[in-house]
Amino acid sequence: MLCTPVIRTLRSQLPDAEIHFATKDSYRGLLDENPYLTKVHSLQESLSQLIKELKSENFDLVIDLHNNLRTRWIKTRLGVKSYTLDKLNIKKWLLTTFKINLLPNRHIVDRYMDCVEPLGIKMDSLGLDYFIPHKDEVELEWLPKEYQHGYAAVVIGAKFATKRLPKERIIELCDRINKPIILIGGPEEKPIGEEVELFFQRNEPEDFSEGLHALGKKAIVFNACGKFNFHQSASLVKQSRWVFTHDTGLMHVAAAFKKEIYSIWGSTIPEFGMYPYRTKFVIFENKNLKCRPCSKLGHKTCPAGHFKCMRELHFDFYLPD
C-alpha cells in the first residue's frame, strides 16, 4: 500500500519504462489489479527460483523499498544498479529503547520517494492507490438496511496484540460512535466481533427500546469479521463515512480512498512515519506513558504488563449526523 505512490509516479513520469514489482506471494493480490505495473513477481517457497525469474528479465535498475537480508541477496545476484531505502533502524532502536527521538518528521512514503529522486521522479498530489477487483466490490444492498445510508467502519484487527484495543474498549468505542457500525477484521477477529455484536443487540422490551431511542442511542453493530476477503473488506471501508482503525493495513486502504480516519495507536507511535497519508485524520494515543513506544512493530503481550497505552486511551470525538 505505502509503495503505490512510487509505482504511480514512475509510470507517469517514465511512461516508456517497464515497471515490475516483487513481493511475497501472500501480498500479490494487493498488486495484481494495479494498472501502473507491467508485471508482478512473487516469492513462494524458493528465493532461488524467484531470483532466476528476475534475472531472466534483464533489469536495468532495482529500487529496494524493503532493505532486508533477502532483498540484499536479490540485488547481489541481479548485479545491476540499485537505489535502497534507509530504514533508519538505529534511530528506531534509540527511540524504542531509550526514548531518544532522532527520526525525521517525514512520512515513510516520502522517504520511499527519496529512492527514485535520482531518476528525476517527483511526488504528485494523489496519495495512496488501492484497486479493488470488480468481483470483490460489495454492494450496499447486500448489507442490512440500517447500513445503506451511511455507517462507520471499525477495523478491530492488527497483526500484534499490543496494537489492538481490548474487547471492552471496542465496546466502549462503538457506544461512543453511536452510529450504525460494521466491524471489519479477519477470521481471527470473528469471535470478538460476535461478542461485540451481541452486546449491542436490542432484544429488550419495546418500552426499553423506546427509552434508548429517546437517549439517542443509535449504535447497532454488524460483525463482518471473517465474512469477507481483504478486497471485500476494502470495499466496505471505501463505502463508509468514517473509519476507526488501529495501526494496520486497512488504515492505509482508508487513506487511499480519502476517508476521514480515526487512528488508534498502542505500542507503536505515528512518529515512525506510518500515519494516514494525505487524508483527514485524528490520532488517538496515550502520550502520558514513558514506556511508549515499546516496539516499532508490536508485541504479543504488553512488556510492562499493564497495557495502559490501550486501556487508558481516551476517545474524544464527535460525529455529525
Image (spheres, helix red, strand yellow):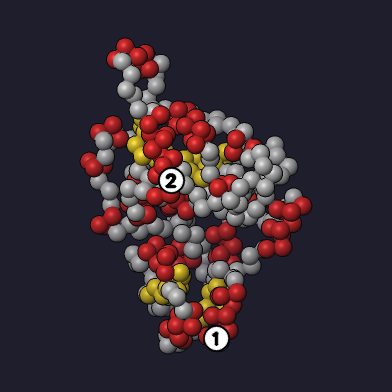
Q: Which residue is mark 1?
A: 77
Q: Is residue 3 above or below residue 197?
A: below
Quick check: marks 1 and 2 in contact, CB under 8 Å? no
| Quadrant that contains the C terminus | top left
Q: Is residue 141 visible?
A: yes
Q: Earlier in the sequence, mark 1 or mark 2?
A: 1
Instruction: Please tell me how crowded label 2 is: few (under 14), some (14-19), or many (20+) other residues with Cα within 10 Å.
Output: some
Q: Is residue 154 above or below residue 71?
A: above
- Circle number at residue 189: 2
Query: Of 119 and 301, which appears nearest the observer?
Result: 301
Please tell me which residue is depicted at 60% across the width and 44% down the height of the picture: 266
- Circle number at residue 180: none
Q: CA distance from mark 1 to mark 2?
A: 41 Å
Label 1 is placed on what type of residue? Arg
- Give the percent coordinates (x, y) of residue 320: 42, 28
Instruction: Please tell me how crowded label 1 is: few (under 14), some (14-19), or many (20+) other residues with Cα within 10 Å.
Output: some
Q: Is residue 250 above or below residue 260?
A: below
Please tell me which residue is depicted at 73% across the width and 42% down the height of the picture: 290
Q: Quadrant of residue 108?
A: bottom right
Q: Is residue 51 visible?
A: no
- 159 relative position to 53: left or right: right
Q: Residue pushed farthest top?
A: 207
Q: Quadrant of residue 296?
A: bottom right
Label 2 is placed on what type of residue? Glu
- Give the percent coordinates (x, y) of residue 188: 43, 49
Query: Of 67 and 9, which appears nearest the observer?
Result: 67
Q: Secondary structure at mark 1?
A: helix
Please tell me which residue is depicted at 62% across the width and 33% down the height of the picture: 312
